[in-house]
């Protein structure tokens, strides 16, 4: 992989990962553009904004966000099914490659 390397921000629920991701994106913005690829299972659901600490539309406007609001709340969900039958997780890897190849973080 050439260009900037992906940066993973991980941790337990409620520890400020989304806020940190936005702070990093803002800090890096003078040198390189940053994008956020969501890996929070609850933030995948459409309409579940309050209980999931999903970034607000204003926060999402600060840098591109991916894999938010991609599942309806009534849909059944499992990681095994999602990896096999739905492409969003493989899409996350593709997004990381694409983002990095365009000199973004």
Image (cartoon, rainbow, N blue to C red):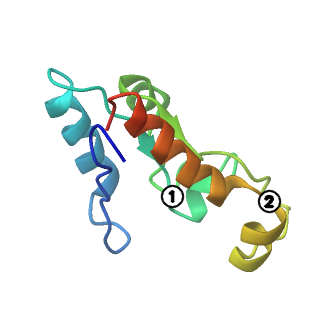
Residue 46 x, y percent position in the rendering: 70, 47
Between circles 1 and 2, the one closer to the viewer is 2
Residue shown at 85% from the left, 61% from the top: 74
- In this rendering, would 45 be left or right of 42? right
Q: In the rendered view, would you say 30 is above or below 14?
A: above
Quarter location, residue 104 = top left
Q: Position of residue 97 (x, y in %)?
A: 47, 45
Above/below status of 65 relative to 48: above
Nearer to the camera, 32 or 56? 32
Q: Which residue is mark 2?
A: 86
The residue under the point 49% across, 29% down is 57
Q: Is residue 72 left or right of residue 94?
A: right
Q: Which mark is residue 52?
A: 1
Q: Label 1: state its secondary structure.
A: loop
Disc 1 to disc 2, C-alpha distance? 22 Å
At label 1, counting other C-alpha atoms closer than 10 Å, the crowd grade (few under 14, some 14-19, many 20 or more) is some
Residue 39 left/right relative to 15: right
Q: Residues within 10 Å of mark 2 (few under 14, many from 20)?
A: few
Which element carries disc 2, helix, strand or loop? loop
Relative depth, front residue between 12 and 63? 63
What residue is at 30 percent from the left and 26 percent from the top? 33
Q: Residue at x 84, y 70 (%)?
A: 76
Please identify the quadrant where the C terminus is shown. top left
Q: Position of residue 26 (x, y in %)?
A: 21, 30
Seen in the picture, residue 71 relative to 28 is either above or below; the reply is: below
Residue 35 in picture, x, y percent from top left:
39, 36
Give the mark nearer the N terminus: 1 vs 2.
Answer: 1
Q: Are marks 1 and 2 in contact (CB under 8 Å)?
A: no
Snapshot quadrant of residue 85? bottom right
- Left-right relation of 14 to 81: left
Q: Quarter of the image holding residue 16?
A: bottom left
């Amino acid at each position: 992989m050439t260009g900037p390397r992906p940066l993973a921000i991980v941790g337990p629920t409620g520890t400020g990962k989304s806020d940190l991701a936005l702070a990093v994106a803002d800090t890096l913005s003078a040198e390189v553009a940053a994008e956020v690829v969501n890996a929070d299972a609850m933030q995948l659901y459409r309409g579940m904004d309050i209980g999931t600490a999903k970034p607000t539309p204003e926060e999402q406007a600060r840098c591109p966000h991916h894999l938010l609001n991609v599942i309806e709340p009534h849909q059944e969900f499992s990681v095994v099914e999602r990896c096999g039958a739905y492409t969003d997780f493989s899409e996350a890897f593709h997004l990381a490659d694409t983002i990095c190849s365009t000199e973004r973080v």
